[in-house]
Amino acid sequence: MGLDDIATILSGFSTVVIAILTVFLWRENRLLRKAGSEPNLVAYFEPHPDGTGGLNISIANVGTGPARNVYFQFLGESDHFSRYNLILDCTTKRGPITLIPQGEKISILFAIGFQLFNPKDSDAKEPMPPFNVRLEWTSLNGADAKCEDYLLDVKPYADLPGLVNKPYLLKIVDSIDGLGKKVGNLNLDVRNLSNLIEANSLENRAVKKVKGNNESI
């Protein structure tokens, strides 16, 4: 075998190696492009930012691309939801939400925190049972449909101030309502007293009162 033959073989082998590397690089670039535009949604509890004792359900896009056509629904026993005073209706599937961009989220007010520990049919403090939130979404081009279930549990929030107990703003509102009722009752008492007029004379040993006009004050 001469040098020319060896050179030809090496050249052919190099061509094959270069072709293999080209296919490998093309495949890796394709996977990187796909990974760079793949959304990933998660659901979790989040205290209301205003500090009012509310508890939100947040749906966040922690992936590397925008999520399109987002649906979410609650999975669990209907009795578990109906036993508590929830602000959000958990009986229907919601969506489609057009788009959740990368790194963004939507927050939905779920309930006032302390109500999740006070069933409507019981005086005992009993936390709401855990439940699942199912999320469905696609990538921006409408392909790669995904579905994930996330378990949510209110028990870890039991010791956080303002969630189990009524927040201070609601306590103030209750106090003002109670004060308003007392003032209303006092107004009636004062109105009745204002209709009484003293008609004493110097000779009277006891206080003499007569009823006056019933006009409201």
Image (cartoon, rainbow, N blue to C red):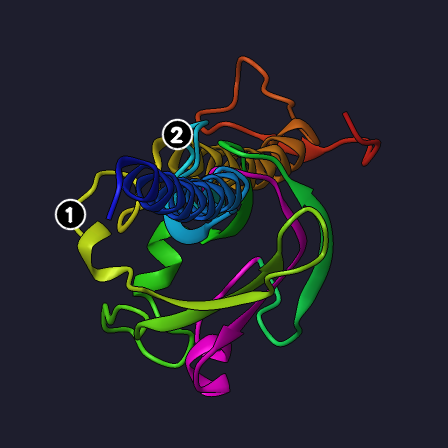
Magenta-colored stretch includes residue 81: yes
Instruction: Tell which circle, 2 or 1, labels the residue nearer the N-terminal end.
Output: 2
Using the rendered image of the protein, determine whether residue 62 is visible from the camera's viewpoint: no
Q: Quadrant of the C terminus?
A: top right
Residue 50 % position (x, y): 45, 27
Tell me if residue 190 comes above or below residue 59 in the rendering.
Answer: above
Please identify the residue farthest to the left as the structure is shown. Answer: 159
The amino acid type found where label 2 is placed reads Gly
Please identify the residue farthest to the front as the structure is shown. Answer: 2
Magenta-colored stretch includes residue 82: yes
Query: What residue appears at the point 43 percent right and 54 percent down from the top-left corner?
Result: 43
Judge from the rendering whether residue 91 lies leftward or rightward of residue 213; answer left or right: left
Residue 55 % position (x, y): 41, 47
From the viewer's side, name the closer residue of 149 and 210.
Answer: 149
Judge from the rendering whether residue 205 lies leftward or rightward of residue 128; answer left or right: right
**How far apart are the alpha carbons under marks 2 and 1?**
15 Å
Which residue is label 2 attached to?
A: 51
Using the rendered image of the protein, determine whether residue 121 is visible from the camera's viewpoint: yes
Residue 215 % position (x, y): 84, 31
Q: Badge 2: how crowded within 10 Å, few (<14), some, or many (20+)?
A: some
Q: Badge 1: how crowded within 10 Å, few (<14), some, or many (20+)?
A: few
Which residue is label 1 attached to?
A: 159
Magenta stretch bounds: 63-87
Which SS class for mark 1? loop
From the viewer's side, name the closer residue of 14 and 56.
Answer: 14
Quarter assignment of residue 209: top right
Query: What residue appears at the point 48 percent right and 43 percent down from the top-left corner?
Result: 60
Query: What residue appears at the point 47 percent right and 78 percent down from the top-left corner?
Result: 75
Tell me if residue 125 comes above or below residue 142 in the rendering.
Answer: below
Quarter assignment of residue 211: top right
Per the rendering, the mark at residue 42 is: none
